Amino acid sequence: MHRHFWDRHEHHSRHGWGGHIRDHIRGRHGRGPEGRIGRLLEHGDLRFVVLALVSEKPRHGYDVMKELEERTGGAYRPSPGVIYPTFSLLEDEGFVAQVGVEGGRKAYEITPAGREALEKNRAGVDAIFARLDEAGTQSSGARPKLQRAMQNLGTALALRMQRGDVTEAQVEAIAAAIDEAAAKVERT
């Protein structure tokens, strides 16, 4: 189930597994005109980020989300709807293996094939982590948290709509929830 989404996702990326990492090394994704850090991760980058974090120690999805939020000072926290399919993909590719359950959560460790893939792309992975660390040093905390929340909403909505089995009643319920959240924000 998750594999189909990622196959389609990779098909639309420019260079597959490591292309975006090469772009970062070449400096194509840096600071924007306002001096802000541009998009933190491109298509395919999260796979290497998760793999690198799992290479440090066995981890579960919540641990990875928390670690990324801490490293970026709240500027980025991937949603469960992004992290868990990434773990599934890495497991399908033989790059991680489940090693048990910690507090009801599946924990994963890197495999020899995963370590080899990570080492082949070490320079790009280091560039991604440098960008994440830079975002953390520039983060004031409040705005990045709002940006993360907006990204999570957008991701959740996109993933839900991509499944294609949305009824008119569900569309109405989703729209009502978003409208209610907007009204709460305006009153805050």
Image: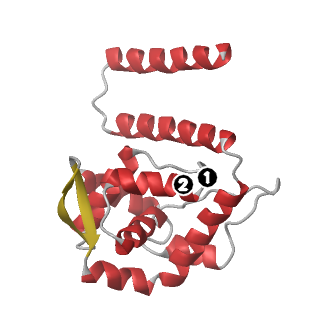
Q: Is residue 90 left or right of residue 79?
A: left
Dot 1 alpha-carbon crowd within 10 angstroms: few under 14, some 14 to 19, many 20 or more: many
The picture quadrant where one finds residue 80 is top left
Side of 40 relative to 50 (left or right): right
* Residue wearing tag 2: 70
According to the picture, the residue beneath numbered tag 1 turns out to be: 73
| Kind of residue at badge 1 | Gly
- Judged from the image, the secondary structure of the residue bearing numbered disc 2 is helix
Q: In the picture, residue 48 is in which quadrant?
A: bottom left
Taking the view exactly as shown, the residue that stands out farthest to the right is 34
Residue drawn at 25 percent across, 59 percent down: 107
Left or right of 118? Residue 84 is left
**Amino acid identity at mark 2:** Glu
Give the vertical position of 31 relative to 116 (above or below).
above
Crowd tier of the residue under label 2, counting other residues whose Cα lies within 10 Å: few below 14, some 14–19, many 20 or above: some
Percent coordinates x, y for residue 124 in the rendering: 54, 78
